[in-house]
């Protein structure tokens, strides 16, 4: 086979491709189709344009085997070798495109039309419609020959297609028809010679001949002709392939185990031809130049499922409208996200000027938002989606503008606050603005604030910057008035204080003078007191001396008087004794008158000598020895 399967590369944590087929639509116990989210995620995450190939046709006609062989695989999609169909719903297999690294290939294996009689008509319709809508190539697989009976079997396809293109003339006819895939009819177990009118013909010529309408008016002919016309109208891009039986009858049930060498060469060649044609001709679907990538396919599938769940089969137009709406919303979301991300880069530098913000906004809008939105949007003829986008962007721009202005305001206020603190507040707290030149200093410092503020760049929109300065001016104006009032008040108080100080100094001088006088007076008093004390002391000493002297003199006098008394007494005694003696002697005198007279004379002399002695004693009053002598 010409196709070589490449193992999908799957970075850790991401599953860009599927290593094996996965269920896309499963059938629950009630026969309802359920979407497999895991498979959907893988498809939706595929960012490459996707070539989608779906196979339909009666059950057990080798559809699954054909899909596996398209990937050069013996196995993959389950084959059913019994009457029971292995494939229910739709199975998907997303792989890298074997021939184009920029594309991905999605194979859809369906449970088949005219499925076993389990009353699943709606389901068949849904599966067909969904496969048609998302596939770029629809393989219609049938067995035997493509004859009138097979054409009849296409009636369902024709009818459904007819339904899908209902309401033609909406202005979207081209787009609607573009949604239809190429139709490749694959006739399996084809045993006949391809001969028409005696000449060999190609399978495509064979198909076209089969699709030729026939003349006739009976109902059967009319219906068949309508089917043929419908198929030709909706599937202008069509082809036919015939494949012989892949191998001998007895090996059919074990086809999965057979290698290429076990298959008939014609079968292998036929499958290769299909592959080549698919690889060459089937392109990813696109509407209005918007190529279907995984996300768009996902949107289509989900929109279809919504319609199925509501019980109706979507038309191509409704599908496109739903797709347009959903993609438009996603486009708005994605473009807005890109806008946000791009603007967030500028937001890091907030605040910026209005020009910068507007400039970045317009540049982002033109170079990022529009292209991103364009990736999604289809059928936005009236630009409703674009208006919504503009509105969303405008809202976000408004929000950013507000943030920018808030940031600018906050920054300006912060700068002003810091400068004010550094240039003004510190000086204010240190009372530098009081006194005669306080207000002048204040004005100079405020001027510094304005000057330094002007040196800061990236402050944001000028009107916000101006507003911040105006606000500061008002605030500073109040402060200036306060300083002015304070300065006047302080000047007045200073004058008062100066006056008080002057008075105090004067009073102090007066007091000092008084104190000096008082000190002098005290000194004088002290000196006088000392003098008086000294004099008093001297007088006291003198008095004491005098008293002592007087006392001694008195004692001496007394002593002398006492002594004199004693002397007198002694003299008296002597005198008495003398008198007695005198008397005796007088008697004796009388007796001895002469002797007495003589003796009297002698006593008188003695008395005179005593008196002389006494006088001498009186003259030497302190000489006791002398006295004692
Ligand atoms: N006669 C015949 N049998 C086939 C062919 N391809 C597959 N088979 C067998 O038919 C049975 C059903 O095949 P499968 O691929 O599951 O058919 P599906 O139900 O259409 O998907 C299996 O046993 C296959 O081996 C074919 O081309 N001719
Ligand atoms: Mg199958």
Image (cartoon, rainbow, N blue to C red):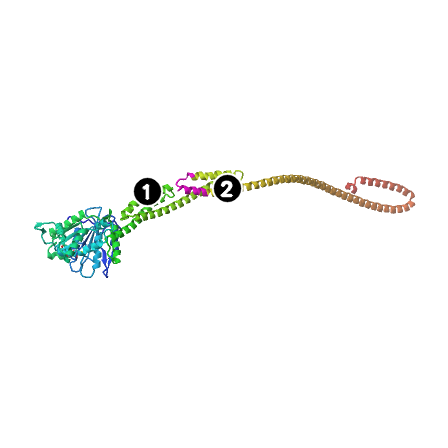
Where is the C terminus found, in terms of image quarters? Answer: top right
Mark 1 sits on what residue? 363
Q: Which residues are magenta?
A: 454-471
Above or below — where is 233 with respect to 428?
Answer: below
**Mark 2 Cα shell of 10 Å, populated few (<14), some (14-19), many (≥20):** some
Rounded to the nearest angstrom, the CA distance separating label 1 from label 2 is 47 Å
| Image coordinates for residue 215, horizontal then vertical, percent | 13, 54
Q: Is residue 241 magenta?
A: no
Q: Is 459 one of the magenta-colored residues?
A: yes
Look at the numbered disc 1 and say if its residue's Cβ is closer than 8 Å to ligand 2: no
Residue 224 percent across, percent down from the top left:
15, 56
Q: Position of residue 457 (x, y in %)?
A: 40, 40
Q: Main secondary structure of the magenta part?
A: helix
Disc 1 and disc 2 in contact, CB within 8 angstroms: no
Is disc 1 surrounded by few (<14), some (14 to 19) or many (20+) residues within 10 Å?
Answer: few
What residue is rendered at 50% in x and 38% in y? 441
Taking 273 as reference, is 512 left or right? right
Q: Which residue is mark 2?
A: 480
**Residue 404 can be seen in this image:** yes
- Report whether residue 74 is seen: no
Q: Position of residue 473 (x, y in %)?
A: 47, 42
């Amino acid at each position: 086979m010409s196709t070589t399967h490449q193992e999908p590369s799957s970075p850790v944590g991401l599953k860009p491709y599927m290593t094996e087929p996965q269920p896309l639509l499963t059938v629950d116990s009630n026969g309802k189709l359920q979407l497999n989210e895991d498979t959907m995620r893988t498809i939706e995450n595929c960012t490459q344009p996707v070539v989608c190939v779906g196979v339909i046709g009666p059950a057990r006609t080798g559809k699954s085997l054909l899909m596996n062989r398209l990937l050069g695989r013996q196995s993959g999609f389950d084959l059913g070798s019994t009457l029971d169909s292995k494939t229910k719903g739709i199975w998907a297999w997303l792989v890298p495109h074997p021939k184009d690294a920029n594309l991905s290939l999605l194979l859809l294996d369906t449970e088949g039309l005219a499925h076993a009689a389990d009353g699943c008509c709606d389901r068949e319709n849904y599966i067909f419609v969904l496969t048609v809508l998302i596939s770029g190539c629809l393989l219609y697989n049938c067995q035997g020959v493509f004859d009138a009976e097979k054409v009849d079997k296409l009636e369902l396809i024709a009818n459904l297609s007819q339904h899908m293109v209902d309401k033609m003339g909406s202005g979207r006819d081209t787009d609607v028809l573009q949604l239809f895939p190429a139709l490749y009819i694959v006739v399996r177990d084809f045993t006949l010679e391809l001969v028409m009118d005696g000449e060999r013909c190609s399978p495509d010529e064979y198909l076209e001949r089969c699709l030729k309408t026939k003349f006739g008016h009976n109902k059967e002919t009319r219906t068949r002709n309508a089917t043929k016309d419908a198929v030709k109208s909706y599937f202008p891009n069509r082809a036919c392939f015939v494949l012989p039986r892949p191998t001998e009858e007895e090996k059919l049930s074990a086809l999965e185990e057979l290698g290429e060498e076990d298959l008939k060469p014609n079968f292998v060649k036929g499958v290769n031809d299909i592959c080549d044609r698919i690889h060459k001709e089937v392109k990813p679907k696109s509407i209005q130049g918007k190529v279907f990538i995984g996300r768009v396919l996902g949107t289509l599938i989900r929109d279809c499922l919504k319609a199925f769940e509501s019980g109706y089969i979507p038309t191509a137009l409704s599908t496109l409208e739903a797709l347009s709406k959903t993609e438009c919303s996603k486009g708005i979301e994605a473009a807005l996200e890109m806008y946000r991300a791009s603007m967030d880069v500028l937001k890091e530098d907030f605040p910026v000027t209005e020009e910068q913000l507007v400039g970045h906004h317009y540049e982002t809008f033109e170079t990022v938002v529009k292209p991103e939105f364009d990736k999604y949007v289809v059928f936005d003829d009236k630009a409703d989606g674009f208006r919504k986008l503009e509105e969303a962007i405008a809202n976000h721009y408004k929000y950013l503008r507000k943030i920018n202005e808030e940031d600018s305001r906050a920054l300006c206020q912060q700068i002003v606050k810091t400068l004010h603190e550094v240039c003004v507040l510190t000086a204010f707290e240190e009372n530098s603005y009081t006194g005669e030149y306080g207000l002048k200093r204040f004005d100079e410092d405020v001027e510094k604030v304005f000057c330094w503020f002007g040196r800061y760049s990236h402050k944001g929109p000028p009107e916000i910057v101006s507003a911040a300065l105006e606000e500061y001016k008002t605030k500073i104006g109040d402060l200036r008035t306060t300083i002015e009032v304070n300065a006047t008040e302080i000047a007045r108080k200073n004058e008062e204080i100066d006056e008080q100080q002057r008075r105090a100094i004067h009073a102090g001088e007066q007091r000092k003078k008084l104190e000096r006088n008082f000190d002098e007076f005290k000194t004088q008093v002290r000196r006088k007191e000392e003098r008086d004390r000294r004099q008093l002391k001297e007088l006291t000493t003198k008095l004491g001396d005098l008293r002592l002297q007087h006392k001694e003199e008195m004692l001496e006098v007394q002593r002398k008087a006492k002594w004199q008394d004693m002397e007198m007494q002694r003299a008296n005694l002597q005198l008495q004794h003398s008198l007695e003696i005198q008397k005796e002697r007088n008697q004796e005198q009388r007796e001895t008158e002469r002797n007495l007279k003589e003796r009297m004379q002698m006593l008188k002399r003695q008395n005179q000598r005593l008196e002389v002695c006494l006088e001498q004693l009186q003259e030497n009053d302190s000489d006791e020895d002398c006295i004692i002598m």
